[in-house]
Image (tube, rainbow, N blue to C red):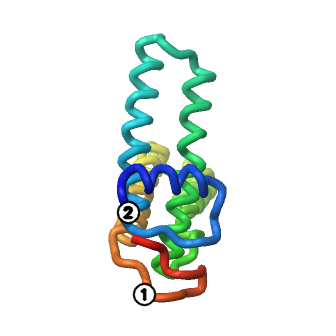
Amino acid sequence: MTVLNAIKNCLKKGLDFKSRASRSEFWWFFVFSLIIYAIDYFLYNQALINLTIAFIIFFAIFIPFIAVLVRRLHDRNRSAYIIVSPLIITLVIAFIGVGFSFIFENYLNYMIYTFYVLCALSLICISISCVKKGTSGDNDYGEEPQS
C-alpha cells in the first residue's frame, strides 16, 4: 500500500473499529500522524493558531489513529481491549495509592514512576503486536486486508 492510499484509507475508515488493517497502512498513517502533530504543535507554539483549532486538528487525526490501531490489532487476531491497559493500570495504581499514601512518605513519587514504567511496557507490547505480521486469510475480525 502506498503512502497516499494508506492515509486516504485511514481517513475514510476513521470510525471503522471492526475490520482489519495491514502493517503498511498502520505504519504509514502513524508517520503521517506524527508529522501532523508536529506541525500542529509548531503552529500553536508560534501563536499562528489558537488552542481550539489545535485541539480540533489533534482529534481529527487521533480518532482515525485509534481506529487504525484497533484494526491493526484485529489483523493480528487480537482484541482491542489491550489499548485500555494503561487506563486500567492508572486506576489500579490510584486506588492502591490512596491507601498507601497515608502510611508511606513519598509514596506518590513511587506511584508515578510505577505508572510510567507500566504504561511504557504496555505501549511496547502494543507496538510489538503492530509490527508483527497479521494472520493469513480470514480471522475472527474479517477478511485479510490488502497490503
User: As rendered, which of 54 and 122 lies closer to the eye?
Assistant: 54
Give above or below for 46 relative to 7. Answer: above
Q: Earlier in the sequence, mark 1 or mark 2?
A: 2
Give above or below for 145 relative to 61. Answer: below
Within the image, what quadrant is residue 42 found in? top left
The residue to which callout 2 is attached is: 1
Decide: few, some or many residues near mark 1? Use Cα within 10 Å; few <14, some 14-19, many ≥20.
Answer: few
Three-letter amino acid code at the position of disc 1: Ser
Picture coordinates of residue 46, whole percent (x, y)? 41, 13
Within the image, what quadrant is residue 100 found in? bottom right
Three-letter amino acid code at the position of disc 2: Met
Give above or below for 100 relative to 59. Answer: below
Give above or below for 147 relative to 56. Answer: below
Q: Which element is circle 2 on?
A: loop
The residue to which callout 1 is attached is: 136
52 left or right of 42 in image: right
* Numbered badge on residue 108: none
Picture coordinates of residue 102, whole percent (x, y)? 58, 48
Q: Which element is circle 1 on?
A: loop
Q: CA distance from mark 1 to mark 2?
A: 17 Å
Picture coordinates of residue 63, whole percent (x, y)? 60, 49
Decide: few, some or many residues near mark 2? Use Cα within 10 Å; few <14, some 14-19, many ≥20.
Answer: some
Badge count = 2
- Look at discs 1 and 2 and give the one toward the viewer: 2
Q: Residue at x 36, y 63 (%)?
A: 24
- Quarter of the image with the C terminus in it: bottom left
Q: Residue at x 42, y 60 (%)?
A: 26
